[in-house]
Amino acid sequence: MGGTGVASARYAEVFYSNPALVGVDNQFFSLPLLSFTLYNVNKLVQPGGALDILFTQDDPDRAFDQLVNSIGSGRGDVLSGQMSFGFISGITGLSIDTTLDVHSQGQGGEASTLVLEGNFAFSLAISVPFTVAGQHTFSFGAGAHLVFRGFSIQDMEGPVRVGGFSAGSILGFYDDEDILASVLNGVPVAFGFAIPLDFGFTYDWREVFTFALALRNVNGDYHMQTYSGVNQLYYMLTGGYLGSTPPGQAEQGGSFSFHTPMSLDAGFALRTPDGGLWDWIDVTFAFDVVDIWDLFREGVSAEGFVSRMRTGIELSLMRTFDFRFGLNGGYMSFGFTFDFQIMSIDLTYATLEYGDRVGDKPLDLFSISFRIGLEN
């Protein structure tokens, strides 16, 4: 739904959208939820693209080469994977999330630098509702995240800069077993933690109209330590190593901190009421504005408002088939969910902006999610 969620998120999404949405009408558990996202999809599916070569010519090596060559210049993303476990019961929710992302930067293609990032988070959220006159409900929520984050850096000397390894170096991955060992043992990394806090408020009228505010990422200070490689870090934490090649001598470099900014977001959602035909056809409309402080600090403008605007609509048929459409910063997104009791499959196509202004560097993505669990 165009990245909306401040007033419309449900189930696992509430942990990072608005903790005030945790409630007795939002019961669920997932064991687990798996998600995979591939970026720059338009280039990959066009004739001669990596996916076109893979499925029409059955040539994995050439498809992998084309995947690397399709990486654009500047900052971007290549792929992402996520696994999460969570539940909401009553007014409390708990989730465990882990992600692995591959970012890109540099000149593009084989000259790009690939950056590895991993996150592991424990999240706890609670919401306290107050009902007035039977149809007005005010909820106040709070959430805390213990986040462990690691990412590859250029080196352990001098100022710490995000870096990694050349995209061209992995073209021989299928032929050279040392490539993986070189990445695990030879790419310096930074590893640390933060404990960001979220606060939320919602006003709900008869479960038809919801207005919400969310203050996210309070205390977003990360405290990091550098290490000589992924395997060296893994060895110091567990005593073991990844892959078939043991790491060399573990080296620990300097420490540093960085701050991730807070975000004040607002939104509203409209839903069809329960009962009658609406039990079979359910429609939700949502509208959000994110980073409100930045919008006013930079000076309110039409371009600034559009870049922070999220809007979307969802049509649910028989609580089984969900169709979504949205606008995220002016870019369209589409989604479909098939929900069959204890299993659901979700497909999403969207475009995100990676430049400083709308239209500078749009990058499309395709995401597929699979969940085992129950939602009520």
Image: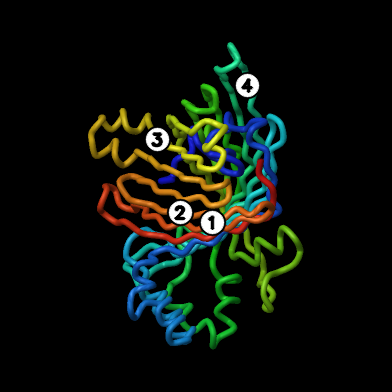
Q: Is residue 226 visible?
A: no
Q: Which mark is residue 346?
A: 1
Q: Which residue is drawn at the image coordinates 35% and 67% (left, top)?
A: 42
Between disc 4 and disc 2, whose residue precedes?
A: 4
Between disc 2 and disc 3, whose residue precedes?
A: 3
Q: Which residue is drawn at the image coordinates 38% and 73% (left, top)?
A: 45
Name the element at disc 2: strand
Q: Nearer the viewer, residue 297 or 328?
A: 328
Kindly report which numbered mark, 1 or 4, lies closer to the viewer in this rendering: 1
Question: How far is mark 1 from mark 2, CA to CA?
Answer: 7 Å
Q: Which mark is residue 335?
A: 2
Question: How far is mark 1 from mark 3, CA to CA?
Answer: 21 Å
Pointer 1 with pointer 2, Cβ within 8 A = yes
Q: Is residue 77 above or below residue 138?
A: below
Q: Which quarter shows the N terminus?
A: top left
Other-residue count near label 1 (Cα within 10 Å), few / some / many at <14 / 14–19 / ≥20? some
Residue named by callout 4: 129
Between disc 4 and disc 3, whose residue precedes?
A: 4
Residue named by callout 3: 287
Question: How far is mark 2 from mark 3, CA to CA?
Answer: 17 Å
Between disc 1 and disc 2, whose residue precedes?
A: 2
What colouring method underlies this structural image?
Answer: rainbow
Other-residue count near label 3 (Cα within 10 Å), few / some / many at <14 / 14–19 / ≥20? many
